[in-house]
Amino acid sequence: MEKNRPVKKWRVGNIECNIWENEKETPEGNIVGFKTVSLRKSWKQNEQWHDAQIQLRRNDIQKVIIVLQKAQEELLLNQEQKETEGD
């Protein structure tokens, strides 16, 4: 059995993103292709490697980008506010 390999792969540090080509059979018996994205973070704890992974469909990607941008904004704004209050 051939192992499924990603169509595209990117890695920055311990974060990895892959695009996968998938197929499924419709109720009519036709085979349709679609792509999914996997996002994985790996880390080492107590000399053992761990990872967490999520699978996304095309429509999920923009939603993930938006919530991550909002989280980043919140963290940056809180940091700026604390630095300003310290003056």
Image (spheres, rainbow, N blue to C red):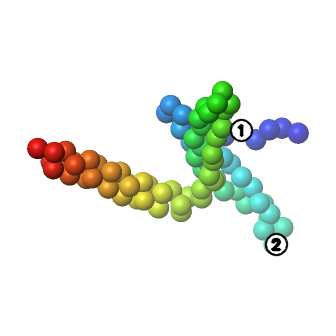
Residue at left 64%, top 30%?
Answer: 46
Quadrant in which the N terminus is drawn: top right
Q: Nearer the viewer, residue 47 or 14?
A: 47
User: Looking at the image, is mark 1 or mark 2 earlier in the sequence?
Assistant: 1
List the residue tagged with mark 1: 5
Q: Nearer the viewer, residue 51 or 33?
A: 51
Say few, some or many: other residues with alpha carbon within 10 Å of mark 1 (under 14 / 14 to 19 / 20 or more): few
Q: Is residue 19 visible?
A: no
The residue positioned farthest toward the front in the image shown: 86
- Against 47, residue 24 (above or below) is below
The residue positioned farthest toward the bottom in the image shown: 27
Amino acid at dot 2: Glu
Residue 44 location (% of width, % of height): 61, 31
* Label 2 secondary element: loop
Residue 85 location (% of width, % of height): 15, 50
Q: Quadrant of residue 9?
A: top right
Residue at left 50%, top 31%?
Answer: 13
Left or right of residue 2, residue 37 in this image: left
Q: Nearer the viewer, mark 1 or mark 2?
A: 1
- Against 29, residue 55 (above or below) is above
Q: Are marks 1 and 2 in contact (CB under 8 Å)?
A: no
Amino acid at dot 1: Arg
Alpha carbon of mark 1 to alpha carbon of mark 2: how far? 28 Å
- Against 41, residue 30 (above or below) is below
Q: Which mark is residue 28?
A: 2
Residue 60 location (% of width, % of height): 53, 61
Q: Nearer the viewer, residue 37 or 68?
A: 68
* Label 1 secondary element: loop
Q: Is residue 72 visible?
A: yes
Q: Quadrant of residue 41?
A: top right
